[in-house]
Image (cartoon, rainbow, N blue to C red):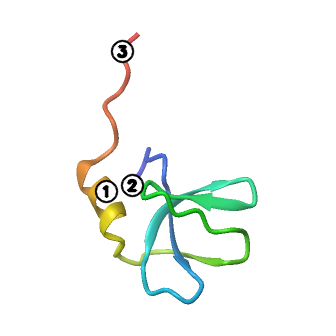
Amino acid sequence: MDGSPYPLRISPSGSSLVHVAARSGTSARTPCGFTPAAGYYTVLSAAPVTCPRCLDFVDAGPPPARRT
């Protein structure tokens, strides 16, 4: 996922879902809108993404480069 705005894979505490995410201060943000607070998610190194909305984002690929 090089160049992705969501380079991390996280699993929220108490959930089996794996999201793609980016750090946002002390928390994380995901393309599906889930935003766990610091300490309420685990960063995973190579787990497959299982959140259906995050999978849609991953399958679509990164947005096209902007032309200036």
Question: In this rendering, which labeled residue sits more in front, label 3 or label 2?
Answer: 3
Label 3 SS: loop
Horizontal side, residue 54 vs residue 30: left or right: left
Q: Residue at x 69, y 68 (%)?
A: 37
In percent of width and height, residue 8 lies at: 52, 63
Q: Earlier in the sequence, mark 1 or mark 3?
A: 1
Which amino acid lies under the numbered mark 3 shown in the image of this protein?
Arg
Q: Which residue in the structure is indicated by mark 3?
A: 67
Q: Earlier in the sequence, mark 2 or mark 1?
A: 2
Res. 38 image quadrant? bottom right
Which label belongs to residue 20?
none
Q: Gap between marks 2 and 1, in whole Å?
A: 9 Å
* Residue 36 image-quadrant placement: bottom right
Dots 1 and 3: beta carbons under 8 Å?
no
**Of the numbered discs in the image, which one, if any, rests on residue 58?**
1
Residue 53: x percent and y percent? 33, 62
Report the front residue among 53 and 3: 53
Question: Farthest front residue?
Answer: 33
- How crowded pointer 3 is (Cα within 10 Å; few <14, some 14-19, many 20+) is rated as few
Q: Which of the two residues, 18 or 46, is positioned nearer the viewer here?
A: 18
Mark 2 Cα-neighbour bin, 10 Å: few <14, some 14–19, many ≥20: few
Kindly give the residue lying farthest to the top in the view shown: 68
Q: 3 and 29: which one is in front?
A: 29
Label 2 close to label 1 by CB (< 8 Å): yes
The amino acid marked with disc number 2 is Met
- Residue at image location 48% in from the left, 46% down from the top: 5
SS at badge 2: loop
Q: Quadrant of the C terminus?
A: top left
Q: Position of residue 67 (x, y in %)?
A: 36, 15
Q: Marks 1 and 3, how far apart in space?
A: 22 Å
Q: Residue at x 27, y 58 (%)?
A: 56
